[in-house]
Amino acid sequence: MNPFFTTYEYIPFDRIKFEDYEPAIMRGIEEEDKDIESIVSNRDKATFENTIEALDNAGSLLENVEECFYNLLSAETNDNLDNLAQKLSPILSEHSNNILLNQKLFERVKSVYNEYKSKNFDGLTTEQKTLLEKKYSGFVRNGALLTDEEKTKLRDYSSQLSVLSLQFSQNKLKETNDFFLHITDENDLEGLPDSSKEAAREAAKERNLDGWCITLHAPSMVPFMTYSTKRTLREKVYMAYNTICTHDNDNNNYEIVRSIVNLSLKLANLLGYKNYAEYVLENRMAENTTRVYSLLDNLIDAYMPTARKEVDDVRSIAKEIEGEDFVMMPWDFAYYSNKLKEREYNINSEMVRPYFELSKVKEGVFGLATELYGIKFTKNDNVPVYHKDVEVYDVIDKDNKPLATFYCDFHPRSSKKSGAWMTNFKSEYIDKNGKRILPQVSIVTNFTKPTPDKPALLTLDEVETFLHEFGHSLHGIFANTKYRSLSGTNVYWDFVELPSQFMENFSVERDFLITFARHYKTGEVIPDELIKKIIDSRNFNVAYACMRQVSFGLLDMAYYTITEPLEEDIRTFEKKAWEKAQVINSVNETCMSVQFSHIMAGGYSAGYYSYKWAEVLDADAFSLFKKNGIFNKETADSFRNNILSKGGTEHPMKLYVSFRGQEPTIDALLKRNGIIQ
């Protein structure tokens, strides 16, 4: 029997075969169709229970299968899964449209909505009111008020976007995996730390090659760009990475970008919006493009003078080392930045790496959650996993009751896309039988791998990434809602990064670091002198980093605020879009747009500003912890109860004010970054 058709507590990865996915998804579609027909054919008057709740509970099999399938598509894919995803994408898009454009279903939803709206939603809890408004607006925003002819167009646009986004991601993964720099002369490794050399040798062995291999995966590429003394090789790696999906082959994404952007405009226009950003921002904290641009412009005004000085300082040390006629190029910036950082703070990522052995970092991060919230993580080797690298933990609440299951998948491989993310295998909610479904949460990263001689030793950036994704995970783990569609990270996109970025603050807190950071050989606790260097250097090039993020936000907004079809060359458009936030000139052949998965295939279309929006929130929120004590349990309980457990049950600003007592200002961020005193 197909494992998806059986009753299981954990996804039975040990029994699932590739052949199981398609029939399970097709049956899931059939069952959801029956659920919808049951709602539509109900002769009783439409009520909150028989329409809105029933709709939220519909399609449980399909959701379970999709959560498994699409998580593997990112974390452990292969050609079979990629091809099946291409085949299923238009089918699933059509199925979704069949529900959202079902006029009889919409009439029942609208009837319930109008009834409760007429009496100011009296008789509903806050969560029920939010669910009702979300369901109604979901239909309207997906075309329920369109004519039949317009609905046909909408189906076509949605289907095309679904296929194009998938193709964009697959092309990027293939291009990333296709490149490696094969080094056979050990002199070409000059400057690299031993950890990078060892990893490069392992990468070569994996390809059945002698010597060393540098790949475009972050744990390989980043230290190479930071430490390699071989400028021509840095240029080669830089150009390989920054020209991904620009080459004259099947993986070229130029026309895919154009098609995605233009289809998004068509879809928005069809629904009555002047551009796609206007459509997206209607359901965001920012609400409109004016407020987004106001944030980005305020950041440029505040940070640009410092960013220019930071880049000038890097140029100065480069000229000091190489001569006055030296012209710094983009592939030089990380290398000479590191030289300057070492000079000013006597610190680099390799100095801290021995204190951040992965198993100890896990203990520290889990221990932080225990200290703040009283929860515990217990390894469970009996849960099936999709790859041998995956670890599973039972999460126990402070009352000793089961809270969640937590999957960890830390290291890069060719079957995994780049980056880091949190996801769910099961979301928390109360099912139609009144049973609470516990969340099954996963984080996937591409951290430095262990070698035969050393365990996995992380950089401080990787520790921050762990904390970031763990923050997302806590949002899922602590979910305590009735309805699945409002649970955990189902919140406004410009609010979803608050819990994750909030956790990053702990990475430079001494009281946290000393709980776990021990030298992997000697067991020595990280010295106070080194912690001081970490803290003192935390704002090194912070303004440059801010402008980089702002430039991405400007590029995103430029694409999705167009009101006429994009016909311009993609590289030309890109350079104009982010020009006012650039502090280092880019190289003509390079292009970010064709690999910008966040805004082309990752749900952040017209939403990349969210990272900076949430940074304002996280700095403001953490300032309360700094005031009360970073382990203060009362403050932590308030953060859990008002933010982490509430999901999308209320407007995020209301949740934030319930925690903080006031709306956020940019001041805490500017102070944290040293822009103002």
Image: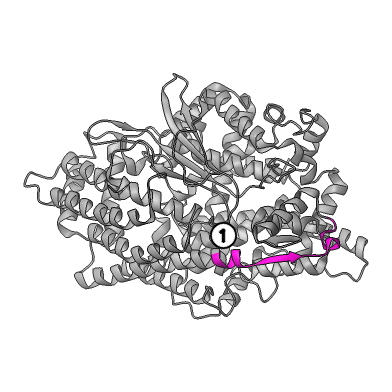
Q: Residue at x 70, y 59 (%)?
A: 204
The amino acid at mark 1 is Gly
Residue numbers of the magenta segment? 174-191
Depth order, front residue of 49/85: 85
The number of numbered badges drawn on the structure is: 1
**227 or 612, nearer to the observer:** 227
The residue sitting at 13% across, 45% down in the picture is 46
Closer-to-camera residue (467/458)? 458
Looking at the image, residue 350 sits to the left or right of residue 136; the answer is: right
Q: Position of residue 138 (x, y in %)?
A: 30, 54
Quarter of the image where one finds residue 357: top right
The residue drawn where x is 53% and y is 80% is: 568
| Element class at badge 1 | helix
Q: Is residue 46 left or right of residue 98?
A: left
What residue did someone put label 1 on?
Answer: 553
Q: Residues within 10 Å of mark 1 (few under 14, many from 20)?
A: many
Q: Is residue 544 visible?
A: no
Give the left or right position of residue 253, taking residue 347 as reference: left
Q: Is residue 187 magenta?
A: yes
Quadrant assignment, res 235:
bottom right
* Residue 202 place in picture, x, y as percent: 70, 53
